[in-house]
Image (spheres, grey):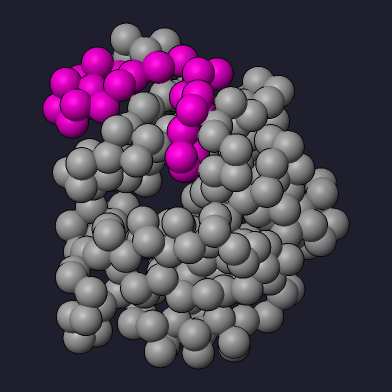
Amino acid sequence: MKIGIIGAGHIGGSLVRRLRELGHDVTVSNSRSPETLADLAKETGATAAWAKDTATDADLVIVSIPQKNVPDLVDGIVDARKPGAPVIETNNYYPQQRDGEIAAIEDGQVESAWVAEQIGAPVYKVFNGIFWKHLLENGKPSGTPNRIALPIAGADGPGRELVDGVVDQLGFDPVDAGSIAESWRQQPGTPVYGKDFDAENTRKALAEATRERTSEWTARTV
């Protein structure tokens, strides 16, 4: 499968490494020139590209960059992907720690819905709550007891089936977290965020989530 990954940080870089190990054709970019990714390309066999070209003819696109940088992506950044190819976004809104205030999110827009609006394409939210080293090292074969589960929010259909399959290939149990409108259940500050729960406990944590942003995860502190 041809996969384009926009972002080569901890999560993006880990996905490049693991997806190449699985034999996928991976193109990766960052906010700079392809030459700055020469070491990662040499290590993994991935193709380094400009961000604007990363999604070309891709079966799957992954956007894994700081939330505050999403508006800086060129218009139509994922439009050159294959028709119907899903887009994953792994981002989190860290207002105090990195991103500053994003008014629409603070006013109640779900983080992933905001990303989808910015890039002009529907998205699936996954990989946002797992520690990058665990993503890189802790995948297990299907059926392994206590296998780590990852919540996936987004629309039903072939796109979800593809995303579920990729998560399973990487060594994690895919768990249906509902639509993007429900993806607040896996945002920072929720019971599932940052946890290595199995599928049963992931579903339980998603059900226990509340939508209110806690003080650590809002820019609008008193």
Q: Name the residue located 62 percent from the left edge and 66 percent from the top edge.
A: 156
Q: Name the residue located 36 percent from the left edge and 27 percent from the top edge.
A: 27
Residue 10 seen by the camera: no
Q: Position of residue 129 (x, y in %)?
A: 45, 62
Q: Name the residue located 41 percent from the left edge and 71 percent from the top edge.
A: 174
Residue nearer the viewer, 86 or 65: 86
In magenta segment, residue 27: no
In magenta segment, residue 48: yes
Please give left or right for residue 208 compared with residue 6 in the image: right
Please give left or right for residue 48 compared with residue 147 in the image: right
Q: Which quadrant would the N terminus be assigned to in this image?
A: top left
As displayed, is residue 152 above or below residue 74? Answer: below
Q: Which quadrant would the C terminus be assigned to in this image?
A: bottom right
Residue nearer the viewer, 42 or 121: 121
Q: Name the residue located 82 percent from the left edge and 49 percent from the top edge.
A: 104
Q: Position of residue 154 (x, y in %)?
A: 62, 62
As displayed, is residue 95 above or below residue 164? Answer: above
Q: Position of residue 34 (x, y in %)?
A: 37, 13
Tell me where the magenta segment starts and ends, as one range. 37-62
